[in-house]
Image (cartoon, grey):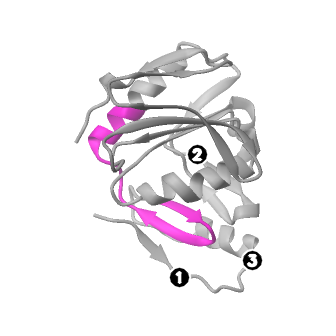
Amino acid sequence: MSALTVSQDPDQNWDDLVRYWEEMEWPEGSKVEIIEGIITVSPAPASRHNVIAERIQRRLYSVIPEELGIFQTLAIAVPSRLGMLIPDLLVAPVRECAEADSHIPAALAELVVEVTSKSNAGHDRVSKPAAYAGAGIPLYLLVDRWAPGGPTATLYGEPKGDVYRVLSAVKFGDPIVLPEPFGITLETGEFPVD
């Protein structure tokens, strides 16, 4: 199953898009995001996708301070890019997340993780990193199961404008290091491959 886009009036503003996103009844279990001003509805991820997210989440819990949490379905707002994005994993302050109704400002995130699905790999490789960098999120980890040369993990950091610098890129099977404040090594050999 692939993602579906919902056409919007090009003259709608950010507040109208968010209101529509919040008030519409979307298919249960789907992931609904606003990507570059277009509402995108994706099916629930496959089990291998979830296993990768779980492996990363388990390692992160061993190192993050108690004031930070790891969230799987929390939206982050990037109004400058007309984006309401739901990373596969998001590390952000628990207090601000607990006070949020439907989303938090993207600038609160310390780390976002995306695990590609066949239907949305392009968004995870192009649109989302531009939005995350533009919001100033310090680290973006892309676990790309569908990369053209085979599965890879790429860590981006040092955002400037809407561009990240590649800090590390590995093929599945090689470790990737998340720098401080995390200071952990992820063993990508533990990630299932399709």
Q: Does residue 102 appear in this view? A: no
Q: Which amino acid does the dot numbered 1 rest on?
A: Ser
Asked if residue 33 lies in the magenta stretch, the reply is yes
Looking at the rendering, which quadrant does residue 157 occupy? top right
Residue beneath disc 2: 74
Mark nearer the N terminus (1 vs 2): 1
Q: Is 20 placed above or below 101 here? A: below
Q: Which amino acid does the dot numbered 3 rest on?
A: Asn
Residue 74 lies left or right of residue 78; in this view the side is left
Q: Quadrant of the N terminus?
A: bottom left
SS type, badge 3: loop
Highlighted range, magenta: 32-53
At x 49%, y 69%, the residue is 25
- Separation of residues labelled 1 and 2 (CA atoms): 23 Å
SS type, badge 1: loop
Q: Is 158 placed above or below 84 here? A: above
From the viewer's perspective, is the residue at label 3 or at label 2 nearer? 3
Can you tell which mark lies on residue 89? Answer: none
Horizontal and vertical percent position of residue 182:
62, 19
Residue 179 lies left or right of residue 173; in this view the side is right
How dense is the environment of label 3, judged by Cα within 10 Å: few (below 14), some, or many (20 and up)? Answer: few
From the viewer's perspective, is the residue at label 1 or at label 2 nearer? 1
Q: Which amino acid does the dot numbered 2 rest on?
A: Leu
Mark nearer the N terminus (3 vs 2): 3
Residue beneath disc 3: 13
Horizontal and vertical percent position of residue 46:
29, 47
Residue beneath disc 1: 7
